[in-house]
Amino acid sequence: MLAVLALTPGCAESADVWGYDVELARTKLRERRYEPFLSLDFSEIDTSEAQRLGDGSAYYLALIFERAGLQQESLRLLQQSWTADPEPWRRRSLIALLERQLAAEHYQDTLLLSRQALEHYGEDSEIAFYSLEALYRAASYADLLAGIEARETAAPVSPADEAGRWIPGIDIALWHAVAAYRLQKPDWIDRFYAVFSDYPATAHHARLFLFARNQGDILPRFDRRQRLLIEARYHLADGRSDQSARLFRTLIDDAAADAEQAVELTGSALLPDLGRALTAGGDWRLSAPAIEKLLNVVAGRVSREQLARLYEYLGRVQRSGGNRAAALSSFRRALELDNRGADRDRVAWYVLQLLISGEPAAAVGFLETHAGGFHGPSRFNGLLDELASQLVRRRDWSALQRAERALDGNVDEGSLAQYAVINAAAARAGLAAARDRDDEHYLRRAREQWHNPYYALVAAVLLDAARGMLDGHGGPPVNPAVEGSLLPDADAAQAAQRGDDQAADCALAAYVAGYFAHGLLVEGYLAARLYEADLPDRALVEYAAIIAESGNYLDSLRLMDVVVRRSSRVPPREWAYLMYPRAFAQEMAAVIQAERLEPELFYALVREESYFSADISSHVGAIGLAQLMPATAAEVARAMRLENPDLIDPQTNLSLGARYLRAQIDRFGSLQDALLAYNAGPTRVRRWRAQNGTLPPLLYQEAVPFHETRHYVRKILVSAAFYGRLYGGVEPDTVFMQLFGEP
């Protein structure tokens, strides 16, 4: 059985591990009761007994011992895993051993182990690079050059290759440059300059530049143009885009009289860094003329794609400098030149963003012309939301209908659903003319999609078809500790031996599951996120259930977000219970009753504010479960006669949050405005109500000018609908009426 909580025994002749019954040992590990193992005298035990716990246990035990500061014991267990475990644990233990040897400056041991491993793994780039790094750090430059030559002969690398912690192309280039310099090879100058001329700016450039400056005899060997380029990439790699931009502008000035040099600046290795520096460099009044100068020199000498990138960079510089009209002109020129997908989408995004900010109706015209050419439509979702809000605030119902027609078939169903709901709501309120098809046609499409659950629910309410919508199938979530694994019945090693197509995925699931079987929940979560694209939904759901069982709702919910986001359907009930847990139930019940709040709505608010993480802080300083700003919390605490409230304490934070929400409900007489005020502040809500309060509640919600606040209320409606249905038998249309009133 491949399972999170029942690993396959490795040895049948003995039922104990280091004096403990195997099943008891597994239970202790799963429950993170590590003390008996950490107190073992490793000089008296046989590390091979770890195999009796199952494949990979030696690897996970090594991590447990390392976390406890027992380094030698950890290394012995990694060695055990490397010599006795099957894949994928064998290779992962090997990499861990190599990493620790390198960090400890045991370079000879690193060389020996990597060479031994290559006899088994063949031309494995990551393992080979440990040996090259060891030679470099040990200053064994002749051997390093020989190793590089052998490596390049066996497996040539490209600048885009990756191998673990290395970027092979530039790492080899850097090592080769330093080794050639140290050995005074005839080509050391060319090797050194190639690092800066042939590769995009990375931390490697900062390392090599500082090395060169410290030597004193390297930089003077280059001419002015080369030194400018070397320094420009060094500053860019080290985060000083303003200095890099200044140097690139000087390079452009120098190249104005030399078309060949100008063309070199637009090459594939240089142009992205030039654009990155000039667009982020700050002094846009100087950068825009520099790009225009470069354009004038290279026109007719470079490809359409290169010209398109230059016009894009010019537009970005002009946009940053506030020259909207010039930026639009440059971006439009880039669109004319470049028909490629991702690059064209990026430029189209800038055009659309500029039009929305100044001429929303013109933005609709742009969509009518260009939406059919979107390569990755999801890139535009945020802009389409902003466009809809702008048009609602302007009461431009005709443009909203035109936009919906332009988007139909060209964007994901979630964005289209937003326009369908807005247009239907406007038509029902008598604000917009009837469309060429019945509103129900568009609303049914909106209801059937789940890319954007808010608009699916709202469409269902408008169609009077929301009852039972969230019932899904199945029951409460399975507790893996009680019910067993949700993973498929398959043994990773057996699958690998059979050569099944799913063997690799099965082994990967077993590897990630092993973290949870050994109580390593943080590491398990990180591994699940790292390999989320290759793990089945049922595995991620099981991991989320185990994490939630530990009380870490934040990581559990983040993992469930991954599952739900890629499913694009109403989640089954097993998932829904994990997505909408009744965390802190006792504390929540007390404050809900005290402040006369609807349970589903306050649970939804706390979920969306903090994902039930009691000690979380936002980037603006909001704290705790209800995400209270300290000043707001202090004001509410004074009213409640609480002295020095601890905002990390769940009961205190929830009490203050519930009281503040109740105060907003009483102030505005509207739950919708209360939630808007909770997120954006009462002053803004009074202004929004004065500007757009005559609109129906659904359209008033769309007219809120802050995307974050619009989305905040949307998320609360969806969460409240699930909480109501899962725990109170409340239908979505009832929750809708609580929030918005009659549809």
Image: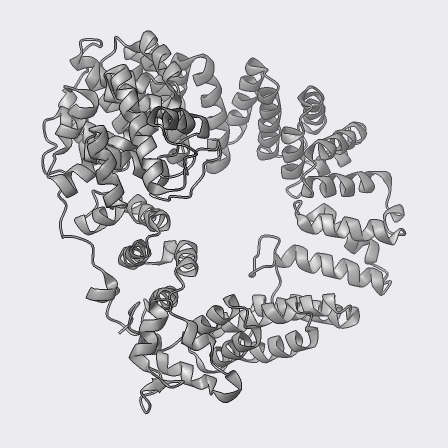
Looking at the image, residue 338 lies above or below residue 683: below
Q: Is residue 346 left or right of residue 569?
A: right
Confirm whether residue 157 shows in the render.
yes
Looking at the image, residue 221 lies above or below residue 697: below
Looking at the image, residue 47 lies above or below residue 515: below
Q: Is residue 79 left or right of residue 271?
A: left
- Which percent across, then down, holds residue 464? 9, 27
- Which percent across, then down, holds residue 594? 22, 31
Q: How is the image coloured?
A: one colour
Q: Residue at the location (42% across, 73% down)?
A: 35
Q: Residue at the location (62% across, 19% down)?
A: 321
- Which percent across, then down, holds residue 701? 29, 20
Q: Residue at the location (72% across, 57% down)?
A: 174
- 279 or 154: which is nearer to us? 279
The image shows a total of numbered marks equal to 0
Q: Is residue 722 left or right of residue 148?
A: left
Q: Quadrant of the C terminus?
A: top left
Residue at the extreme bottom of the image, as rendered = 13
Q: Residue at the location (56% across, 61% down)?
A: 163
- Which percent across, then down, holds residue 397? 28, 12
Confirm whether residue 404 shows in the render.
no
Q: Is residue 446 left or right of residue 685?
A: left
Q: Quadrant of residue 569?
A: top left
- 386 or 154: which is nearer to us? 386
Q: Quadrant of the N terminus?
A: bottom left
- 458 or 18: which is nearer to us? 18
Q: Quadrant of residue 384?
A: top left
- 91 or 223: which is nearer to us? 91
Q: Quadrant of residue 292?
A: top right
